[in-house]
Structure formats: structure tokens, C-alpha cells
Image (cartoon, rainbow, N blue to C red):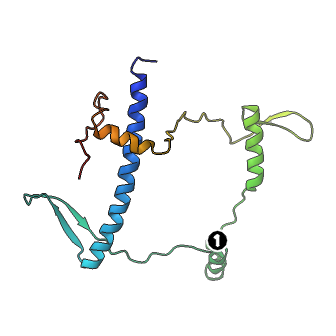
Amino acid sequence: MSTNFPTRLLHEAAMTALHKTIGDDLNGMRAAMQQDLEALGGERMAAKLPDGTKVASITLSNPTPKPAITDEAAFVRFVEDIAPGEVMTVKVVRPAFVTKLFEDMEKRGSAEIIDPDNGEIIEVEGVEMKTRAASHSVTFEKNGREALAAAWRAGLLNHIEGLPQLPAGGAE
């Protein structure tokens, strides 16, 4: 573990807070923009800097209806009636049994189960044990994001290399 590990911990917490805040802000902005574009009836609008330089275009899509199957069984019956050769019979393992087998294999730590008939260990064909990627999460204390944001705006996180710097008082 390096000596700047505590700084990396704080850096990740700050970036996660920023990511969440920006994501929430973006979702709200997109909803408001959608309403504005629909109200104005415009299909494409230019986003411009104060000096008039166009920096982007925002385009209102005009989606057309697309089919989506909402009742698989009814759809299959329909196709069987009009084109029976287009329907396939597929063998599948009951999901509850898959769950049971996977639980047994996880307990053993290998793609093997014990044969219930004779007690022999048998390899499960078509299954491999895969190592999951390690991960972690950031959980904030109540008002933790707000406290980080306040510290960030006050310049108290300026020592963290790579963390965007915010002007005092926050962006308007």
C-alpha cells in the first residue's frame, strides 16, 4: 500500500460524489430539455457560447412505433397458425434446477456435483467456474456528499492530483 493511499480513498469518494451529482443533474436537465424542445416544436437547436460560437446541436428525435412482443406464448401460437415451419422446439433446463446445480458447484468450488444415485463426483459438462472480478463500492454518510462538495468548493481538496478544481462558492 502506497503512502498516498488515504488520498486515493478521498479522491475516489469525491469523484463518486461528483459522478452521482452530475448524473442526477444531467437526468433532470434532459427531462427539462425534452419538455422545452417539444413545447417549442423545434427539431434541432444550436447550443452557443455567449460570443455566439456554436458548440453543439440538440436534436429532438421523432420516434416511430416499433413492434415489441408482449406475450410470447400468444405470439408463438399466432406464428404456428400462419407459418408452422417457423416455430422451433427448444429444450431448456428448468431455472430452479439450474440454480440448485450452481449452488452445489459454488459450495464445491468446482464444476462438479455429487451424483445423487451413487455418490460419485461427476463433472458438469458445459459449465466452467469463472472468477468474478473484485469490486468495491462507496457508501456515503448522511450529508457526506454535501460535506465533500463544501470541502471541494472551499479548496480543501486541492492537494488531490487529477481532481477537477471548483471555484469558491461553486459553479453558478
Q: Is residue 29 left or right of residue 118?
A: left
Q: Badge 1 local density, few (<14 within 10 Å), some, or many (20+)?
A: few
Q: Residue 36, position in %: x, y?
A: 28, 73
The residue carrying mark 1 is 87
Element under label 1? Answer: loop
Residue at image position (40%, 17%) is 3
Tell me the residue at 35%/42% (across/down): 149
> Percent from the top left, x then y, of residue 102?
73, 43
Report which quarter residue 130 is drawn in. Answer: top right
Q: Residue at x 72, y 37 (%)?
A: 106
Residue nearest the observer in this picture, 29 or 74 = 29
Give the camera-side residue of 13 and 141.
Answer: 141
Q: Looking at this rendering, what residue extends furthest in the bottom direction?
A: 82
Count of numbered labels shown in the rendering: 1
> Tag 1: residue type?
Val
Question: Is residue 68 rendered to the left or right of residue 152?
Answer: right
Which residue lies most toward the right here? 118
Point out residue 101 in the picture as x, y percentages from the top left corner.
77, 44
Please give left or right for residue 157 compared with residue 10 in the image: left
Quarter of the image where one finds residue 121: top right
Front in this rendered view, residue 62 or 94: 62
Residue plotted at (29% across, 32% down)? 162
Q: Is residue 35 above or below residue 57?
A: below
Q: Position of residue 142 (x, y in %)?
A: 49, 45
